[in-house]
Amino acid sequence: MSLDNFAIIESTLREGEQFANAFFTSDQKVEIAKLLDAFGVEYLELTSPVASPQSRLDIERIAKLGLKTKILTHVRCHMDDARVAVETGADGIDVLFGTSSYLRQFSHGKDIAYIIDSAQEVIEFVKGRGLEVRFSSEDSFRSDLVDLLTIYRTVDKIGVNRVGIADTVGVANPMQVYELVRTLRGVVHCDIEFHGHNDTGCAVANSYCALQAGATHVDTSVLGIGERNGITPLGGLIARMYAYNPDLVRQRYNLPLLREVENFVANLVEVDVPFNNYITGYTAFTHKAGIHAKGILNNPSTYEILDPADFGLTRYIHVAHRLTGWNAIKQRAEQLKLNLPDDVIKEITAQIKALADQKRLSLDDVDVLLRSYHSQSVGEDKRDALPSA
Ligand code: HCA
Ligand code: CU
């Protein structure tokens, strides 16, 4: 399986609903679903229909919208839930079981034979209804490897479409993810999904390593919202995949919509988009040091692996500070349509650096200086041109 065949399972409307500040009305869910569909994600995962009556109605409503993206709902690996889930109109059901010793001991207390029996019943039932079914084990990285592989091998034989590995507590590192997915790839024939929490900042790297090791599906949410500090952010995964294959990402996704969907969700859950957010952060395309500015002006690829124009964004060169360089100042003069020779630009740059050693400068300060030099030089030109008395 090649990295180019990855699919995004966008879980803002499931994992994202588990974010502390999340409350989405039915209309807001529809709006998020439509935006993500227009963006081009392959799947949307929606909160379990047994979570609440409105959750069930919302799946039914979204499933009827006729979106291009496939609709999944997410339930416990239990017939009570599966019976309701198959009636919602969803295209597929993601089922989940806790296999870690913590969950077996402190949560549901079930043994592996019981897990396999329930999985078999649920998978056969969902498949019998003609729907796609995924089986995933919660807290996979703190589960016994032999147990895990036994369960996955069995569900693969039963005919599950996909098995899922979940780093529920965000404990895994990229090499561990690679190892586990690689091992699993040798054991099952079905697709493999990765769901990674971001407690130690590894979610994007872990997702990418999962794909490198043969996973086919990655779970994301807008801005990474979810339990605690969340999961793999959609924008982060997009940035990562773009770095790997820009053409593929440009073809598949409507990239300028990323900022729109992020702003929409940020607003609903009352958070700001972080300044250092992947792609859309306030400083994501801002260049500062003189050497960087010069490189960018000559060829943006010198310091940019992502082209802001692909995302409907623009780069910004920050010139008003002591790390500035004359190439950046010259560019600013040109933007202002002030024609000044290079030696004058260099003199102005020296002045800006001296001033910036004293205080924080604004772009206005730079502009005032450029303009005053310019009017001086124009004045001199005019004087030169005056007829001599
Ligand atoms: C949870 C469940 C889950 C499920 C992931 C999956 C997790 O909220 O605890 O279905 O693959 O992180 O384990 O989000
Ligand atoms: Cu999760």
Image (cartoon, rainbow, N blue to C red):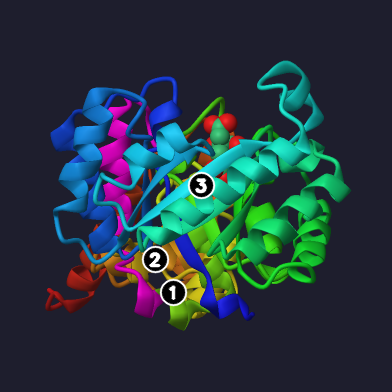
Residue numbers of the magenta segment: 250-273
Mark 3 vs mark 2, foreground winner is: 3
Q: Secondary structure at mark 3?
A: helix
For the residues marked 3 and 2, what is the alpha-carbon distance in whole angstroms?
A: 46 Å
Residue at point 82%, 52% (across, down): 176
The amino acid beneath tag 3 is: Val
Residue at point 61%, 76% (across, down): 3
Label disc, if present, on residue 90 of the rendered structure: none
Judge by depth and name the residue closer to the eye, 24 or 376: 24
Mark 2 vs mark 1, foreground winner is: 1
- In this rendering, is residue 257 above or below 353? below
Residue 275 is one of the magenta-drawn residues: no
Q: Which residue is mark 2?
A: 308
Judge by depth and name the residue closer to the eye, 328 or 59: 59
For the residues marked 2 and 1, what is the alpha-carbon distance in whole angstroms?
A: 14 Å
Q: Tell me where residue 25 sits by quadrant.
A: top left
Residue furthest to the top in view is: 106
Asked if disc 2 and disc 1 are in contact, CB closer than 8 Å, the reply is no
Q: Which residue is mark 1?
A: 249
Residue at point 32%, 58% (across, down): 91
For the residues marked 3 and 1, what is the alpha-carbon distance in whole angstroms?
A: 35 Å
The amino acid beneath tag 2 is: Pro
Question: Would residue 162 be visible to someone looking at this image?
Answer: yes
Q: Position of residue 52 (x, y in %)?
A: 30, 23
Q: If you read the primary sequence from the N terminus, does the residue marked by circle 3 or circle 1 appear first?
A: 3
Q: Which residue is mark 3?
A: 122
Q: Tell me where residue 73 sits by quadrant.
A: top left
Q: Secondary structure at mark 1?
A: helix
Callout 2: CB less than 8 Å from ligand 2: no
Is 83 on the left or on the right of 56, as rendered? Answer: right
